[in-house]
Image (cartoon, rainbow, N blue to C red):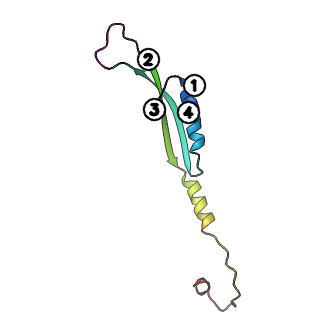
Amino acid sequence: MKETYACAPDAEAALKQFINKNAYEHLNITGQVANEEKRKPGRPGKNSPISMVYRLQIEVSLDQEAVQRTRQRLSCFITITSLDQSYSPREVLK
């Protein structure tokens, strides 16, 4: 978000690239392009030019539903054993 762009199309392309590069099933990434006035440092003159720069504003949040689905998927496993039925599930895992 510190990087500036000279034009809006460049900033939009950078935003799309950032979202595609950092896409992850557990994250929701959204963003927008914001424009700002950029002035030279010091006291402005009467005819001092004002240029526009563009910055990315990105928001990232955790998708709790996707995290829960992954936890459920990873917490299930199958155990095959040749032990008879007299063993409890706890004893089989030991």
Q: Amino acid at mark 3?
A: Glu
Say whether marks 4 and 3 touch (CB < 8 Å).
yes
**Residue indicated by mark 2:** 51
Say whether residue 40 is left or right of residue 54.
Answer: left
At a point 52% along the width and 32% down the height, the residue shown is 32
**Which corner quadrant holds the C terminus?**
bottom right
Q: Give the mark, 4 or 2, whose residue is nearer the N terminus.
A: 4
**Which corner quadrant holds the N terminus?**
top left
Q: Give the mark, 3 or 1, whose residue is nearer the N terminus.
A: 3
**Residue indicated by mark 3:** 3
Q: Amino acid at mark 2?
A: Ser
Residue 37 higher or lower than 45, as above or below = below
**Residue 89, quarter of the rendered image:** bottom right
Q: Give the mark, 4 or 3, whose residue is nearer the N terminus.
A: 3
Q: How far apart are labels 2 and 3 at the CA level?
A: 16 Å
Q: How far apart are labels 3 and 1 at the CA level?
A: 14 Å
Q: Amino acid at mark 1?
A: Pro
Identify which residue, 65 or 27, lies in the foreground: 27
Q: Secondary structure at mark 3?
A: loop
**Residue indicated by mark 1:** 9
**Crowding near the residue tagged with mark 4, few <14, some 14–19, many ≥20 C-alpha atoms within 10 Å:** some
Q: How far apart are labels 1 and 2 at the CA level?
A: 16 Å
**Residue 15 percent across, percent down from the top left:** 55, 34
Q: Which residues are magenta?
A: 41-50
Residue 48 higher or lower than 19, as above or below = above
**Residue 45 percent across, percent down from the top left:** 31, 10
**Residue 83 got which mark?**
none
**Residue 14 got which mark?**
4
Q: Is residue 55 magenta?
A: no
